Image (tube, coloured by chain):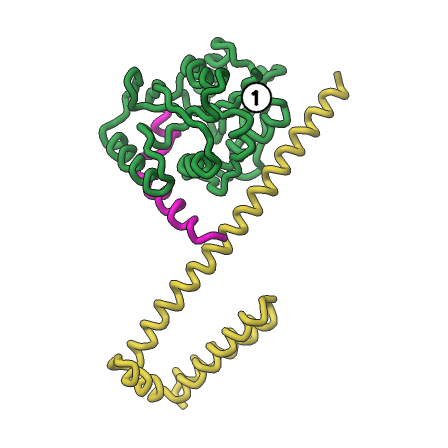
Chain colours: A green, B yellow
Amino acid sequence: MLVFIVIPVYNEGAPLFEVISDLKTQGFHNIILVDDGSDPPLRYPALDDGIFIIRHPVNMGQGAALETGMKLAIKKGADVVVHFDADGQHSAVDIHQLTAPLFENRADIVLGSRFMEKSETNISRLRKILVHGARYFNKCMTGLLLTDAHNGLRAINKKAMSKMNFTQNRMAHATEILTIIKKNNLRWKEVPVSVWYTAYSKTKGQKPFQIINIFFDIVLKKLKP
Amino acid sequence: MNIIQIVLLSSLGFIFVLYFTWFRNASYDKMILLILLITGGVFVINPELTNKMARWVGVGRGADLLLYLSIVGFSFLFILFYSKIRRMEYTLTELTRNQALLEQQLKETQSNEKS
C-alpha cells in the first residue's frame, strides 16, 4: 500500500528537517510538505523523488493545508495518508501502528491518542484539562467520545480521504473530522501514540487557549454560509 | 431646524447616494435600506414620534427604543457579514488550493521535460 505523509508547514525552522529525516529512517519516503504561505517560502535543501512541496500563496490554516496535501496525495495514487506535525512533537515510529488497522482493513481512519494505556506524553496540566473539556465538547457536537481531542496524528484510507472536504480551514478541522466520520459511518479506531512537547513545538503549535477560537469556529459554523 | 437635524439628514442623504450608486445589491436589500432611511429621516424631523412609539410599546423614552432596535439591527448585521465572510473564505480556499495544485503539476511537467 502506498503511504503518503502530509505535513502542513508554516514558517518552520530546522526541526522540520529532523522530522523528515526521522520519517525516512522509518521507511516513509513519500512526503508532501504543504507550505501554507510561509514567508519566505519553504526551501528544502535535499529534494528527492519522494518529497513534494506544494505551496499555498497565502496562509489558509492547518485544515486547508491538510486537505490540499490529501488532494495531491490522491493524485499521486496514495492508498493511505498520514497527517503529521512539522514541529517534531510526533514520533515517526508511531506511524506503523497507526497504519496497521488500515492495512488489515479494520478501520477507515485511525486517530492517535495521548491518553490511552501505553501513550506517552509530557502534556502540561492546563492543556490536559482543556483537551478533556474538548473531548466532551466534541461528544456534544459529533456524538463521538474519544480518549483524546485535537491530536494531529492520524492515518486515513482512500475511502475516508474521499470524504474529507473540510469547511474548517483552521484548527477546528479536527472536530470536523469526527463529524465526517459520524456522517459517513466510517470505521474508526484510536491507538496510543507519543507526543512530546518541546520548547520549539510550544512556540509553533496550538496554544492551550486557542481552544476558545476552535469553539467559536465550530459554533459559528452552524450559521451556514 | 436644529444643527443636529441638518447633520443627521445630510448623513442619511449621503448613505442613500453612496449605497445606491456604489453597491449593487439585491432589490430587497435596497428596499430595506430605503425604508430604514425614510424612517430615520422621519424620526430626525419629528423626534417626538419616537417617544410616542416608545410609550406605545412600553419603553420609557424614544432614545431607549432606538438603542434597543440598534442592538438587534447590529446583531443581525454581524451574522449577515459573518456569513458573507465565511462564503468568501471558502471561495478563496478553493482558489488557493486549485492554484497550488496547478503550480505543482506545472513544476513537475517542467522538471520531467528537463530530464
The secondary structure that dominates the magenta segment is helix
Provide the residue span drawn in magenta.
Answer: A200-225
Vertical order, A201 against B75 (above or below): above
| Residue B45 in picture, x, y percent from top left | 41, 88
Residue farthest toward the left in the current orientation of the protein: A125
Tag 1: amino acid: Asp
Looking at the picture, tell me which residue is in the foreground, B47 or B76: B76
| Residue A220 in picture, x, y percent from top left | 40, 50
Camera sees residue A41: no
Give the chain of mark 1.
A
Residue drawn 33% across the image and 88% down it: B48
Residue drawn 52% across the image and 77% down it: B34
Magenta-colored stretch includes residue B95:
no
Judged from the image, the secondary structure of the residue bearing numbered disc 1 is loop
Residue drawn 31% across the image and 87% down it: B52
Camera sees residue A75: yes
Q: Judge from the rendering whether residue A174 lies leftward or rightward of residue B106; answer left or right.
A: left
Magenta-colored stretch includes residue A214:
yes
